[in-house]
Each structure stands twice: as structure tokens, then as C-alpha cells.
């Protein structure tokens, strides 16, 4: 498939995403002291910090795409929309699931959920963009 680029850039040729709506990925974490809002600077309570929850959501989307993209291709986060609904204490396990909702050109959108033993603790959407790694890195790491 030829993927249309964002921002009017020249088209990037990439293999058809070897996945369909419904593709799933997962991430798990036993909350430790380094994962808390206090440790991450996002609050003053020793519970799972929202930045760590967002990282778990992204980790689950990366897991879903593992083995799907061609060599030399990857995906990067573009948009994260999250509701952090309930606190999770240190020592509790969090299970995150990402489900592929839609593929639009290079944009891949997932629905994400996070649960602990008490039920749903977070939910949202994560959009990733397929990239050519060399081209992407050349934009941010130019030698002067």
C-alpha cells in the first residue's frame, strides 16, 4: 500500500499493515515506588501516576504492532487521549489492553483500557503513525 504522509510530504511506500481492526496488544505492570505520581512529579500521592499509565497504554499499542511493520519501519505516538478513572496502589498489578480500531493511511488508532483487581482504572485512545526509521531520524538528528 502507499501511505499518504501528513503535512503534504512525499508519499512513503510501506507494506500493507498485516493487521486488521481488532488486533490486540497487552502490557502489564506491578506498581512500584518509581511508578507513583510522587516519583514522577505528577502529584503528591503514592499511587500509579498518570504519566506511567500513558506509557503503559503506548507500550500495549507497540506490542500490538510487533511483527506487523516491515524492517526499517516503526511507529511513533502522535495523540493520546486518556481518562485516569481510579487510583492503583503500590504493589497492585495493572493490565493494559490495546485494540486496533482503525487504519487511515499511516495513522493507526487504538482503544486502550487499564484494569487492576478492582476493575477499570483508565481508558482512552492512542494514535500512532507508521514511519520509515531512517527518514524520521534524519529529520531530528541532522549533522551540522
Image (cartoon, grey):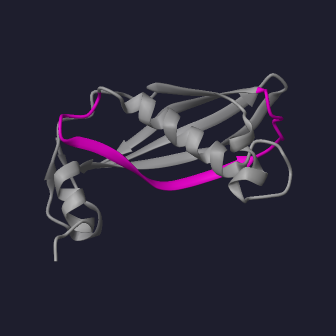
| Residue 18 within the magenta-colored segment of the rendering | no
Foreground of the two, 59 or 4: 59
**In the rendered image of this protein, does residue 44 appear above or below residue 59?**
below
**In the rendered image of this protein, does residue 50 appear above or below residue 136?**
above
Using residue 23 as the reference point, say whether residue 129 is left or right of it: left
| Residue 81 within the magenta-colored segment of the rendering | yes
Residue 62 in the image, given as x and y percentages of width and height: 43, 36
Residue 130 in the image, given as x and y percentages of width and height: 30, 47
Foreground of the two, 23 or 140: 140
Q: Which residues are magenta?
A: 68-92
Using residue 74 as the reference point, say whether residue 78 is left or right of it: right
Q: Quadrant of the N terminus?
A: top left
For image coordinates 17% across by 57% down, the residue present is: 135
For image coordinates 75% across by 42% down, the residue present is: 48
Residue 76 in the image, given as x and y percentages of width and height: 38, 50
- From this viewpoint, which residue is outermost toward the top? 117
Q: Quadrant of the C terminus?
A: bottom left
For image coordinates 51% across by 42% down, the residue present is: 58
Using residue 1 as the reference point, say whether residue 58 is left or right of it: right
For image coordinates 23% across by 58% down, the residue present is: 137
Q: Quadrant of residue 98?
A: top right
**In the rendered image of this protein, does residue 35 appear above or below residue 67?**
below
Q: Quadrant of residue 96?
A: top right
Amino acid at each position: 500500500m502507499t501511505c499518504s504522509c501528513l503535512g503534504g510530504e512525499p508519499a512513503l511506500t510501506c507494506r500493507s499493515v498485516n493487521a486488521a481492526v481488532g488486533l490486540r496488544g497487552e502490557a502489564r505492570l506491578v506498581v512500584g515506588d518509581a511508578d507513583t505520581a510522587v516519583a514522577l512529579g505528577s502529584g503528591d500521592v503514592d499511587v500509579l501516576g498518570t504519566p506511567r499509565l500513558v506509557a503503559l497504554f503506548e507500550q500495549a499499542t507497540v506490542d500490538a504492532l510487533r511483527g506487523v511493520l516491515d524492517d526499517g519501519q516503526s511507529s511513533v505516538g502522535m495523540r493520546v487521549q486518556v481518562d485516569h478513572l481510579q487510583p492503583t496502589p503500590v504493589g497492585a498489578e495493572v493490565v493494559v489492553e490495546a485494540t486496533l480500531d482503525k487504519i487511515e493511511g499511516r495513522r493507526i488508532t487504538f482503544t486502550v483500557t487499564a484494569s487492576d483487581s478492582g476493575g477499570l482504572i483508565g481508558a482512552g485512545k492512542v494514535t500512532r503513525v507508521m514511519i520509515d526509521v531512517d527518514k524520521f531520524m534524519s529529520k531530528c538528528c541532522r549533522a551540522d
